Image (spheres, rainbow, N blue to C red):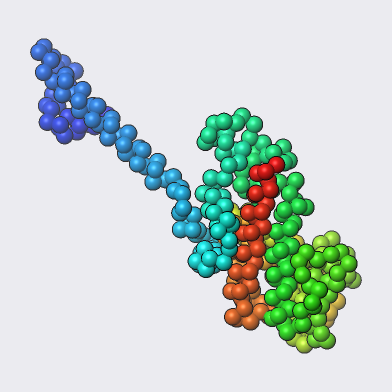
C-alpha cells in the first residue's frame, strides 16, 4: 500500500516525503493536492471496474457470436437467421429469448423489481425462466413441448421417406391421429414411426420415434428426436444413445447379420445445432445434398414451436 501511495503522489507531482510518519505540514499546502490526487485515483479505479463489468456482461444481440464449444455447429445454428426462412414474429421472439429479455416472472423480479413471487405461473414449482418454460415445465410436457417434438418428427420422417425413395402417403400429414398408419415402406425398406418395437429380449425403452429397416443393406437404424435445453445439448445426445442402445442390441440379435445403430436427432430449443449434421451425414438414409434441408426443416419447426409455447405461456 505504501509503494502504491508513493506511485500516486509521484504521478501527480507531490513529494513522497508527505508519507513519512514524522512529516509535518504546518501551512497545509499539500493537503489539497493530496485530496485531489486521491479523488482522481478513486474515480479512475471506479471507471476501470465499471469497464470490466461491461466487458464481462453478455451484450444484447451477440448470442450468435457467442456460440462456441466442442460439438456446436455455429454455421448451422444461425442458418435460420441468414436464410430468413422463419416469420418475422418468430425472429423477434427468438432474439428476445436468446438475450434473456422475455418478460418472465424471474426477469420481473430481478430486473424490473416489480414481483416477489418468481415461481412459474403454470406449474408453481420452479423459478420461471425461458429455459424452464421451453424444456422443464411439467405443465407443458404433454402440450406445447410434445407438439414441438411432433412437428420436428414429422419433418424427419418425411425426409427419411423421400431419401429412401418410399412413396409418401397422401394421408401423411401433421398432426397425425391415433388410428393413422405408422408403418411405411416397400419390400426392401420399412419405416416404423412412434411404435412399440417387439423383440425377443425384455427391453424397457422400446418405443423410439422412428426405426428404419434397410433389408438390402442389412442395416437397422433407430432415430430419436429431442428438443434440448441449449446448455445441455450434447448431454441429451449421449442420453438418447444410451437410452436405446439395449433395443439396438436386441434387434441385432433378432436380425442376424444386420448392423444396428442409434442416431440422436437433437436440436436446441432456440435453434442451436450440435452434431446433428454429422449424425445425419453418417446415416445411410439421407443423400449428401439432403442433410442441410433436413437440418433447416427441423430447425424451423423447433423455433416456431418454441415461440408458440412461449406465447401461450405468457398469456396464462
Residue at figure coordinates x 86%, y 64% from the top left: 178
Q: Residue at x 84, y 61 (%)?
A: 204
Residue beneath the point at 61% across and 64% down = 299
Residue 220 versus residue 102 in the image, above or below: below
Q: How many marks?
A: 0
Nearer the observer, 292 or 203: 292
Residue found at x 88% / y 70%: 198
Q: Position of residue 197 (x, y in %)?
A: 85, 69
Left or right: 64 as drawn, with respect to 47: right
> Is residue 107 at all visible to an observer of this figure?
yes
40 relative to 287 in the view: left or right: left
Q: Position of residue 228 (x, y in %)?
A: 65, 56
* Residue 2 seen in this snapshot: no
- Residue 285 placed where, x, y %? 69, 79
Q: Quadrant of residue 92?
A: bottom right
Instruction: Specify the quadrant that holds the N terminus.
Output: top left
Indicate whether 179 appears above or below 191: above
Quadrant containing the C terminus is top right
Residue 37 is left or right of residue 47, and the answer is left
- Residue 10's place in the image compared with 299, above or below, is above
Amino acid at each position: 500500500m505504501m509503494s502504491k501511495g508513493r506511485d500516486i503522489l509521484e504521478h501527480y507531482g507531490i513529494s513522497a516525503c508527505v508519507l513519512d510518519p514524522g512529516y509535518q505540514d504546518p501551512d497545509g499546502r499539500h493537503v489539497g493536492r493530496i485530496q485531489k490526487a486521491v479523488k482522481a485515483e478513486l474515480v479512475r479505479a471506479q471507471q476501470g471496474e465499471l469497464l470490466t463489468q461491461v466487458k464481462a456482461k453478455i451484450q444484447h444481440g451477440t448470442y450468435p457470436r457467442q456460440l462456441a464449444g466442442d460439438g456446436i455447429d455455429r454455421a448451422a445454428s444461425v442458418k435460420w437467421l441468414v436464410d430468413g426462412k422463419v416469420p418475422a414474429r418468430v425472429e423477434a421472439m427468438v432474439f428476445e429469448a436468446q438475450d434473456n429479455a422475455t418478460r418472465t416472472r424471474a426477469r420481473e423480479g430481478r430486473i424490473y423489481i416489480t414481483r416477489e413471487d418468481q415461481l412459474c405461473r403454470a406449474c408453481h414449482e420452479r423459478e420461471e425462466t425461458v429455459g424452464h418454460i421451453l424444456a422443464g415445465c411439467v405443465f407443458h410436457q404433454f402440450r406445447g413441448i410434445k407438439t414441438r417434438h411432433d412437428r420436428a418428427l414429422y419433418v424427419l420422417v418425411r425426409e427419411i421417406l423421400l431419401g429412401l425413395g418410399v412413396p409418401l402417403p397422401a394421408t401423411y400429414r401433421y398432426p397425425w391421429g391415433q388410428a393413422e398408419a405408422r408403418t411405411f415402406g416397400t419390400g426392401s425398406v420399412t419405416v416404423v414411426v412412434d411404435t412399440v418395437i417387439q423383440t425377443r429380449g425384455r427391453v424397457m425403452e422400446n418405443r423410439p420415434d422412428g426405426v428404419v429397416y434397410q433389408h438390402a443393406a442389412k442395416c437397422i437404424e433407430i432415430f430419436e428426436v429431442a428438443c434440448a435445453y441449449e446448455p445441455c445439448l450434447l448431454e441429451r445426445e449421449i442420453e438418447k444413445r444410451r437410452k436405446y442402445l439395449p433395443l439396438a442390441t436386441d434387434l441385432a440379435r433378432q436380425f442376424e447379420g444386420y448392423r444396428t445403430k442409434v442416431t440422436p436427432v437433437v436440436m436446441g430449443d432456440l435453434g442451436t445445432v450440435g452434431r446433428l449434421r454429422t449424425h445425419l451425414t453418417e446415416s445411410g438414409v439421407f443423400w449428401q445434398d439432403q442433410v442441410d434441408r433436413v437440418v433447416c426443416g427441423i430447425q424451423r419447426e423447433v423455433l416456431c414451436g418454441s415461440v408458440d409455447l412461449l406465447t401461450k405461456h405468457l398469456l396464462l
